[in-house]
């Protein structure tokens, strides 16, 4: 029992240290650039919409997303660069807004009719993948994220 208490205390202490380290990075105002490269488009019509989230609430729509972007598609590819992003944990969602109506269109059953994708190329079973599967950590001056839309 004594060993279990010691182990638990060590785990709590280590997790507090990791949290503190992340806070220190934020306090030091470290920022980086995230380049998002998108592929898999069936055509160049419309634009690709991107949404960057830092929390599960932002990811699920229960809070305002951290930032958004929209860019054109050329030769069935697109790229967007997010500059001066604080070192943190992120998730990126993207969809091909083929008809330029600013929303991911769905059929009568709620299935998307426009292509979409997530960071880590995560896929969900019946809906979007969980935040944890799409999340990555920016902890360097430059990072490239590749997303293949399907």
Image (cartoon, helix red, strand yellow):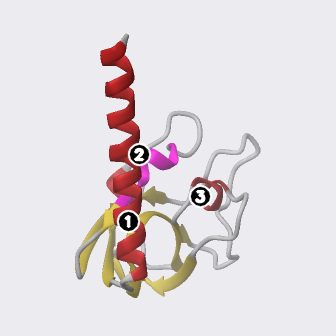
Q: Residue furthest bottom?
A: 84
Answer above or below: position of 120 versus 123: below
- What residue is disc 2 on? 133
Do the residues under discs 2 and 1 have CB atoms within 8 angstroms? no
Taking the image as shown, residue 12 lies to the left or right of residue 126, namely left
Count neighbours of disc 2 (C-alpha within 10 A) and say few if under 14, some if 14 to 19, many if 20 or more.
some
- What residue is disc 1 on? 22
Magenta extent: 130-136
Of marks 1 and 3, which one's residue comes earlier in the chain?
1
| SS type, badge 2 | helix
Count neighbours of disc 3 (C-alpha within 10 A) and say few if under 14, some if 14 to 19, many if 20 or more.
many
On the image, the x and y values in percent for residue 142 come to 23, 80
Q: Nearer the viewer, residue 20 or 123?
A: 20
| SS type, badge 1 | helix
Is 88 contained in the magenta span?
A: no
Give me the residue at 50% from left, 49% from top.
131
For the N terminus, give its image quadrant: top left
- What residue is disc 3 on? 59
Q: Nearer the viewer, residue 82 or 57?
A: 57
Query: Within the image, what quadrant is residue 17 found in?
Result: bottom left
Work out how far the residue at label 2 is from the one at label 3, CA to CA, in angstroms: 12 Å
Taking the image as shown, residue 117 lies to the left or right of residue 146, namely right
Work out how far the residue at label 2 is from the one at label 1, CA to CA, in angstroms: 20 Å
Q: Nearer the viewer, residue 124 or 149?
A: 124
């Amino acid at each position: 029992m004594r060993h279990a208490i010691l182990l638990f205390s060590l785990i709590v202490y280590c997790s507090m240290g990791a949290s503190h380290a992340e806070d220190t990075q934020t306090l030091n105002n470290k920022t980086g650039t995230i380049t998002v490269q998108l592929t898999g488009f069936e055509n160049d019509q419309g634009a690709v919409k991107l949404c960057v989230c830092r929390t599960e609430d932002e990811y699920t729509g229960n809070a305002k997303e951290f930032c958004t972007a929209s860019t054109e598609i050329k030769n069935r590819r697109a790229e967007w660069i997010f500059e001066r992003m604080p070192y943190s944990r992120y998730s990126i969602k993207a969809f091909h807004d083929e008809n330029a109506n600013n929303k991911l269109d769905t059929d009568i059953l709620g299935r998307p009719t426009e292509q979409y994708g997530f960071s880590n190329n995560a896929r969900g079973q019946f809906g979007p993948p969980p935040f944890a599967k799409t999340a990555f950590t920016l902890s360097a001056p430059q990072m490239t994220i590749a997303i293949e839309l399907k």
